[in-house]
Image: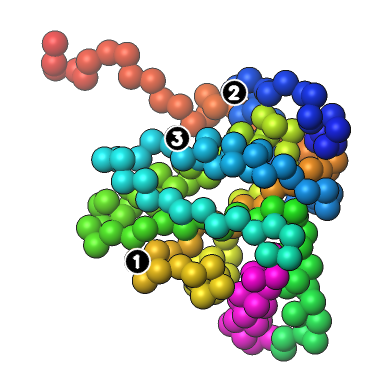
């Protein structure tokens, strides 16, 4: 992964290279990311396809001390997780929650506007994940590491109060963004194993 100085002079990767080299990164440098770059990633996300142009996604960006707003949500989700497993909450749980929230210089909570129509709601949820993939690829093209995360604090909406999510809004994912020198390797099976081709009409029909 590129360093801040290298990235400033590095041309953007082409789309296929970005797709093939994107990996989930969990080790970040504390170096801040230029705000215009973050906006560039969000703009890429905003160009995702969405049925009827509902624009269902919402983005909340946390940097610097703003990340402190996420700590309690992360802690409450941690407590919930230990309780669900019948385990004792460790004494350092709050510190661990803070460490996680400060592990990347930029954290983006992606949420969606819900819809009473179940079909539209499913379409909107899918559109939000397409938007997230756009964001991840744009980050890779910029030489940044990214990591989309869910878990209890997203699935059970512990982040809602701290993020100011409305009643008709629910979180979809938390995306970590930052510079990183973490080494990654690709792990994908050949696409042929998952592909079926149909090149002739069914028997009995012309």
Image quarter hosting the C terminus: top left
Q: Residue furthest left?
A: 205
Question: Which residue is pictured at 68% across the width and 64% down the height?
Answer: 66
Question: Which residue is pictured at 33% across the width and 60% down the height?
Answer: 114
Residue 65 at what x, y percent from top left? 73, 65
- Report the front residue among 123 and 41: 41
Task: Tell me, yes or no, if residue 180 can be seen here.
Answer: yes
Q: Residues within 10 Å of mark 1 (few under 14, many from 20)?
A: few
Task: Tell me, yes or no, if residue 136 can be seen here.
Answer: no
Query: Which mark is in front, 2 or 1?
Result: 1
- The stretch drawn in magenta includes residue 180: no
Residue 64 at what x, y percent from top left? 74, 60
Q: Which mark is residue 81?
A: none
Mark 3 or mark 1, which has the lower sequence index? 3
The magenta region covers 67-87
Circle 1 sits on which residue?
168
Q: CA distance from mark 2 to mark 3?
A: 15 Å
Circle 2 sits on which residue?
15
Mark 2 or mark 3, which has the lower sequence index? 2
Viewed as shown, does residue 156 lie left or right of 51? right
Question: Which residue is pictured at 70% across the width and 57% down the height?
Answer: 63
Disc 2, SS = helix
Task: Look at the magenta stretch and give its main secondary structure.
Answer: helix
Q: Residues within 10 Å of mark 2 (few under 14, many from 20)?
A: few
Viewed as shown, does residue 32 lie left or right of 109? right
Q: Quadrant of residue 1?
A: top right
Q: Residue furthest top?
A: 206
């Amino acid at each position: 992964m590129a360093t801040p100085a290298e990235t400033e002079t590095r041309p953007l990767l082409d789309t296929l290279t970005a797709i093939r080299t994107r990996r989930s990164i969990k080790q970040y440098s504390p170096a801040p990311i230029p705000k215009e770059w973050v906006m560039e990633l969000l703009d890429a996300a905003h160009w995702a396809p969405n049925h009827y142009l509902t624009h269902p996604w919402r983005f909340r960006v946390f940097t610097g001390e703003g990340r402190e707003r996420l700590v309690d949500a992360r802690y409450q989700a941690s407590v919930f997780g230990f309780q669900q497993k019948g385990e004792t909450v460790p004494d350092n749980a709050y510190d661990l929650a803070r460490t996680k929230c400060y592990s990347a210089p930029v954290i983006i909570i992606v949420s969606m506007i819900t819809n009473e129509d179940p079909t539209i709601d499913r379409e909107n949820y899918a559109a939000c994940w397409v938007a997230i993939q756009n964001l991840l690829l744009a980050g890779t093209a910029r030489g940044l590491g990214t990591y989309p995360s869910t878990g209890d604090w997203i699935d059970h909406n512990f982040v809602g109060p701290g993020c100011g999510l409305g009643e008709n809004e629910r979180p979809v994912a938390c995306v970590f963004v930052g510079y990183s020198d973490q080494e990654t390797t690709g792990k994908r099976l050949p696409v042929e194993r998952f592909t079926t081709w149909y090149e002739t009409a069914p028997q009995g029909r012309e």
